[in-house]
Image (cartoon, grey):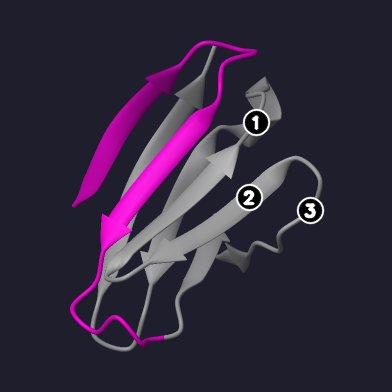
Amino acid sequence: IARNKFIEAGCPIILQCEISDPTAQVSWLKDGVELQQDSGLDIQSEGTMRKMIIQSAEVKHSGVYSCEAVDDRIAFKVDVA
């Protein structure tokens, strides 16, 4: 079940998920494609919390994001307007 988020263009997109295993590798995907950290995208981990931040949302950032680990998958539907 996706969690819906409506973001105003220019505002940050902050997605958080909590996973069961704090040592698990987590992948962030957008529309099924794995995201890589770059100048506008920050991926953070602290204990069981995982966070993905896009500094300045644009319409092109709309889509379905997921936080995936071995035992966990959390999806977010993001609409930027």
As helix, strand or loop, the secondary structure at mark 2 comes to strand
For the residues labelled 3 and 1, say whether their Cβ atoms are less than 8 Å apart. Answer: no
Q: Nearer the viewer, residue 65 or 24?
A: 24
Q: Residue furthest right?
A: 39
As helix, strand or loop, the secondary structure at mark 1 comes to loop
Separation of residues labelled 3 and 2 (CA atoms):
7 Å
Q: Which residue is mark 3?
A: 38
Q: Which residue is mark 2?
A: 42
Separation of residues labelled 3 and 1 (CA atoms):
11 Å
Q: Name the kind of residue labelled 1 in the image.
A: Gln
The magenta segment: 1-24
Residue 4, magenta (yes or no): yes
As helix, strand or loop, the secondary structure at mark 3 comes to loop
- Sequence-wise, the earlier of marks 2 and 1 is 2
- Sequence-wise, the earlier of marks 3 and 1 is 3
Q: Can you give x and y, in whole percent of width and height, for residue 13 in the image?
A: 51, 31
Q: Quadrant of the C terminus?
A: top right
Residue 55 is tagged as 1
Residue 75 shows in this picture: yes
